[in-house]
Image: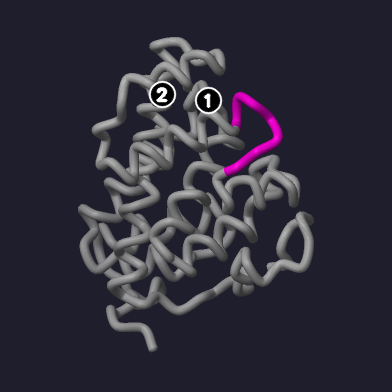
């Protein structure tokens, strides 16, 4: 059962209503997580600005979403994992891309290096080793992209924000539940 109140968009007032209207217009729906965030319009506004800015990232929407999937799995956030799996195709992710994000491992060397780096950032709270930094550089990421991979760091941070909020609130799923990766019978993507 959800542990934090969701703000009903139809009953919201002031800035919360404006922001929830923006969410609805942008996404065609109002995800439950944004309804929880609307308890504090400052939080929802910051999340929306942060998310919009990250949409312009040079690492691309696909990798950004794979990093958020990896972070969601690491943080055991069933809400974000399910939501990101459900909307993944609209962000250009194939079923294999979604599975790669969820497992933090990709057949594509560059993507794999970025996912491993993101995992190291999360695991070591940003205190990555020189070898870990070299590995992502060796995969072809330059310093500007590493700042964007620090955008990957930013993707991790954004993922952690929503993961932690949804874990605290036990936010009710409003998308199909993504099966645990270990429940998948093959290397093919997990059904959502």
Q: Nearer the viewer, residue 53 or 134?
A: 134
Left or right: 7 in relation to 55 = left
Q: Nearer the viewer, residue 134 or 8?
A: 134
Left or right: 25 in relation to 133 = right
x, y (%) of residue 176? 63, 73
Pointers 2 and 1 in contact (CB under 8 A)?
yes
User: Which badge, 2 or 1, is on the more N-terminal residue?
Assistant: 1
Q: How does the figure colour the protein chain or chains?
A: one colour
Residue 6 included in the magenta stretch of the image: no
The answer to whether 89 is drawn above or below residue 92 in the figure is below
Q: CA distance from mark 2 to mark 1?
A: 7 Å
Q: Which residue is mark 2?
A: 148
**Which residues fall within the magenta stretch?**
105-111
Task: Looking at this view, name the residue that lies furthest to the front.
Answer: 131
The answer to whether 91 is drawn above or below residue 163 in the figure is above
- Which residue is depicted at the point 59% across and 33% down? 112
In the picture, which quadrant includes the N terminus?
bottom left
- Which residue is depicted at the point 40% across and 66% down? 33
């Amino acid at each position: 059962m959800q542990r934090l109140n969701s703000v009903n968009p139809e009953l919201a007032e002031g800035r919360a209503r404006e922001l929830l209207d923006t969410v609805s217009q942008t996404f065609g729906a109002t995800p439950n997580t944004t309804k929880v965030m609307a308890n504090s319009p400052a939080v929802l506004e910051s999340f929306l600005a942060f998310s919009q800015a990250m949409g312009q990232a040079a690492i691309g929407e696909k990798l950004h979403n794979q990093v958020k999937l990896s972070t969601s799995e690491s943080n055991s956030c069933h809400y974000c994992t399910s939501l990101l799996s459900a909307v993944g195709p609209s962000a250009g992710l194939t079923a294999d891309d979604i599975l790669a994000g969820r497992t933090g491992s990709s057949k594509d060397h560059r993507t794999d290096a970025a996912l491993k780096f993101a995992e190291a950032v999360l695991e070591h709270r940003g205190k990555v080793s020189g070898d870990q930094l070299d590995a992502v550089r060796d995969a072809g990421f330059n310093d500007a992209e590493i700042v964007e991979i620090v955008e990957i760091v930013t993707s991790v941070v954004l993922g952690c924000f929503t993961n932690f909020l949804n874990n605290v609130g036990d936010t009710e799923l409003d998308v199909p539940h993504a099966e645990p990766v270990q429940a998948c019978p093959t290397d093919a993507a997990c059904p959502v």
